[in-house]
Image (cartoon, helix red, strand yellow):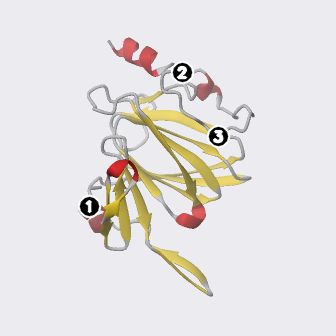
Amino acid sequence: MRGGPFGLLLKAVGLMTVEPLPISGALLVTPKVYSDVRGSFAEIFASTRYADAGIADVFIQDNLSVSRRGVLRGLHGDRRMSKLVQVLEGEAFDVIADAREDSPTYGRWYGTLLKASERRQIYIPKGCLHGFLALSESVAFLYKQSALYDPSSEFGVAWDDPDLAVQWPLAGRPPILSEKDAVNPTLANLVARRA
């Protein structure tokens, strides 16, 4: 084991390393990649190994989105489901924000670069927000979910919420947003609506 960011411990579990992130319950998973003249191989999910690493969720739905450079998807959340996400093609800036009012990290965000070539994954606990910005010409993004998609249980928060203050690497260009994401409320307004 070695120290990771923020003094947290990196743990080797079988064919991967697992590192706690500064959002309560969130994890960075780095599968071991085997490369040779033919290309590369990596195990990207095995239920028993992931359970040993603290990810015991049963993932029941996989989704694949493809985005062009400059597309920002998010911030999206669901109180019923956790997610395991990974870039399969290209590069994206991935963000988690804690929307769980009872969490010690409520209102904090964490962002990192995910590259297909590195195979890194982010585990996102139930109730947290997730979003990403496509940085390459094309980004194929895989989401494993612990619950089936249900639009009545999802929620969204503005990508540019001034209280969250996510530092998106936009390089001076506005992001390409869905109509839905363009009108998401701030986290404070979302919480006020629940009360």
Looking at the rendered structure, the kind of residue marked 3 is Pro
Q: What amino acid is at disc 1?
A: Ala
Q: Name the residue under label 1.
A: 51
User: Mark 3: which secondary structure?
Assistant: loop
Q: Is residue 138 above or below residue 34?
A: above
Q: Are marks 1 and 2 in contact (CB under 8 Å)?
A: no
Which residue is labeled 2 in the image?
Answer: 162
Front position in the image: 177 or 2: 2
Q: How crowded is mark 2: few (under 14 residues within 10 Å), some or many (20 or more)?
A: few
Give neighbour class at mark 3: few <14, some 14-19, many 20+ (Cα, 10 Å): some
Residue 161 vertical position relative to residue 195 in the rendered view, above or below: below
The mark that comes first in sequence, 3 or 1, is 1
Above or below residue 60? Residue 160 is above
- Residue at horizontal 55%, vertical 35%? 74
- What separation in Å lies between label 3 and label 1 (alpha carbons)? 33 Å
The amino acid pointed to by label 2 is Pro
* Badge 1 or badge 2: first in the primary sequence: 1
Which residue is pictured at 75% across the width and 34% down the height?
173
Residue 49 in the image: state x and y as whole percent: 29, 67
Residue 52 coordinates in the image, percent (x, y): 24, 64
Within 10 Å of the Cα at label 1, are there few (<14), some (14-19), or many (20+) other Cα atoms? few
Frontmost of labels 3 and 1 is 3
In this rendering, position of residue 55 left or right of residue 83: left
Horizontal side of residue 10 vs 180, given as left or right: left
Mark 3, residue position: 169
Task: From the viewer's perspective, tell me whether residue 109 is left or right of residue 171.
Answer: left
Q: Are marks 2 and 3 in contact (CB under 8 Å)?
A: no
| Badge 2 or badge 3: first in the primary sequence | 2
Q: Which residue is drawn at 51% across and 19% down?
A: 185
The residue lying toward the viewer, choosing from 32 and 177, is 32
